[in-house]
Image (cartoon, helix red, strand yellow):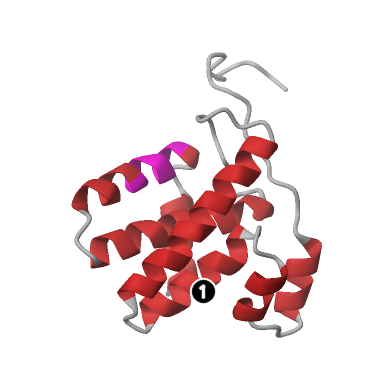
């Protein structure tokens, strides 16, 4: 890797492991609710549940699902060497579940009037990957 233009003080990007069974089950049409019961450690399934709940106007349920996905994602990040800061790139597909859960948590926090939390989450999402919010917005369009 070239060090030209690299911030040598910034940690290496954190890359979560793939969740093959989860992604294959989703592709085969299995419902996120069933997968959450079978794979409660998966941020992706909690993010999908949160996004669905929020799209239906279920603010509190969306918040709860997103909060679980966020915390499961933090556990996974720490297990992958993350030390509380540094890039979590959207380009690495297994990171997307955590990033989507984080974004859903921000949306749900806004829906229930948690303005300070919204700001913290937006900053955290931007610190993970400055383009993630736009990518997530595209998915939801």
- Which residue corresponds to the image point at 37% horizontal and 84% vertical from the top-left? 56
Mark 1 falls on what kind of element?
helix
Judge whether 89 appears above or below 39 on screen.
above
Q: Which residues are magenta?
A: 121-127
> Which residue is labeled 1 in the image?
49
Q: Residue at x 66, y 55 (%)?
A: 93
Q: Nearer the viewer, residue 34 or 136?
A: 34
Q: Does residue 125 show up magenta in the picture?
A: yes
Q: Residue at x 51, y 74 (%)?
A: 49
**Quadrant of residue 30 in the image?**
bottom right
- In the displayed structure image, the side of residue 125 where residue 36 appears, left or right: right
Q: Where is residue 27 shown, x and y percent of the image?
A: 73, 78
- The reply to whether residue 111 is visible in this rendering is yes
- Mark 1 surroundings: few (<14), some (14-19) or many (≥20) residues within 10 A: many
Tell me: residue 124, above or below residue 113. Answer: above
x then y, percent, for residue 10? 53, 21
Split into 4 quadrants, where in the image is the C terminus?
A: bottom left
Q: Is residue 117 magenta?
A: no
- In the drawing, does residue 90 fall left or right of residue 56? right
Q: Nearer the viewer, residue 31 or 93?
A: 31
């Amino acid at each position: 890797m070239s060090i030209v233009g690299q911030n040598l003080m910034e940690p290496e990007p954190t890359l979560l492991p793939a969740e093959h069974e989860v992604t294959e089950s989703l592709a085969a049409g299995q419902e996120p609710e069933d997968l959450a019961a079978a794979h409660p450690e998966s941020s992706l399934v909690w993010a999908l549940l949160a996004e669905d709940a929020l799209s239906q106007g279920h603010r509190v349920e969306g918040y709860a699902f997103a909060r679980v996905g966020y915390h499961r994602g933090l556990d996974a990040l720490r297990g992958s060497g993350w030390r509380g800061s540094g890039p979590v790139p959207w380009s690495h597909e297994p990171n997307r579940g955590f990033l989507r859960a984080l974004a859903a948590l921000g949306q749900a926090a806004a829906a229930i009037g948690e303005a300070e939390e919204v700001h913290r989450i937006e900053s955290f999402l931007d610190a993970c990957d400055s383009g993630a919010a736009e990518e997530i917005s595209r998915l939801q369009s």
